[in-house]
Amino acid sequence: MDNRWAIYIDIEGFSALYPKGNYALLGLNKLMLAIHRIGKNVYPEPPDRLFVHQLGDGFLIVSDFHEECLDRAVLIAAVLMKFIASFGVFSRAAIAEGELSDIKGCYSSEVVGGCHKDNSPTSRMGAGLMTILPVMGTALINAVGIDKRSSKGPLLTIPSEYKSRLSLPFITNDIPNSPLSSIDWIHAELDSLSEITKKAFLKCPPPENLEKLVRNYINKYKLPSEWKESCSLYMGVNYA
């Protein structure tokens, strides 16, 4: 179906964190857990069910149908970003719209024929395996494209035109010289957000604790000025 919303979320600085210990994999572990709990406990049935695909250190989360109001997508992304931050790891996310289709029919029959009978995305190559991604579409392309064009830092980014489709009082800031806006997920305190965390059995720190976690992260990894400026401009976290 066309124009389903899609959240692309990944671990910020994964490649830099990976050689330095367990933080990168801890973040991936907790991100996967949180997405799964939201899908299982909060939105388990049509028309609200979610479809999720892992892409390396990130995930694409896609709605079942088109939704004119984009509050739900932003709430899910904000909950995930808050939860991950509680472990001293940050993520960044982008929201876009598009279509997503099963494209296995476009793949070589020789490759697909080697897939396990349980619909596994792995195809046998003798004693080796090839893992294939069974879906593709503009939902993925658009969301990843927004993430690449966004400013550095743990931002939640949307096209500026989407702001009119938000009914909840999210704090948004336009990114200069860009058709994009950033949503302040750190200071988002809404009943609907708390409801998601409660149903999903997740705990998210309050804004003051999140601000402290951001500052500690900046100090620990000596992040560049652009990263600090993004936190100040788009998330209201001042760094002295």
Image (cartoon, rainbow, N blue to C red):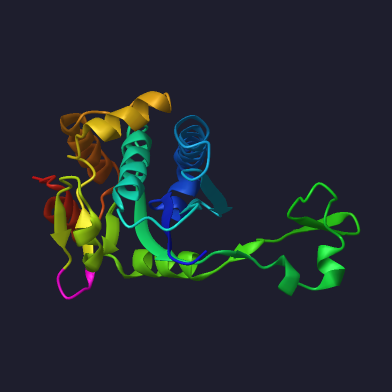
Q: Can you see residue 101? A: yes
In the image, 22 versus 154, the foreground residue is 154
Name the one closer to the observer, 75 or 205: 75
Q: Quadrant of residue 81?
A: top left
Of 126 and 179, nearer the camera is: 179
Kindly report the secondary structure that dominates the magenta region of the rendered protein.
Answer: loop
Describe residue 213's horizontal placement relative to residue 5 as left or right.
left
User: Which quadrant of the rendered structure holds the C terminus?
Assistant: top left
The x and y percentages for residue 103 are 67, 68
Task: Name the residue at 28% across, 29% down.
Answer: 194
Q: Is 233 on the left-hand or right-hand side of 190? A: left
Q: Residue at x 35, y 67 (%)?
A: 146
Count of marks placed on residues: 0
Q: Is residue 198 magenta?
A: no
Asked if residue 227 shows in the view, the reply is no
What residue appears at the point 27 percent right and 54 percent down from the top-left corner?
155
Q: Residue at x 19, y 45 (%)?
A: 168
In the rendered image, residue 201, in percent from the top left (x then y), is placed at: 42, 23
Q: Nearer the viewer, residue 91 or 2?
A: 2
The answer to whether 62 is drawn above or below residue 149 in the figure is above
Left or right: where 128 falls relative to 207: right
Q: Which residues are magenta?
A: 176-180
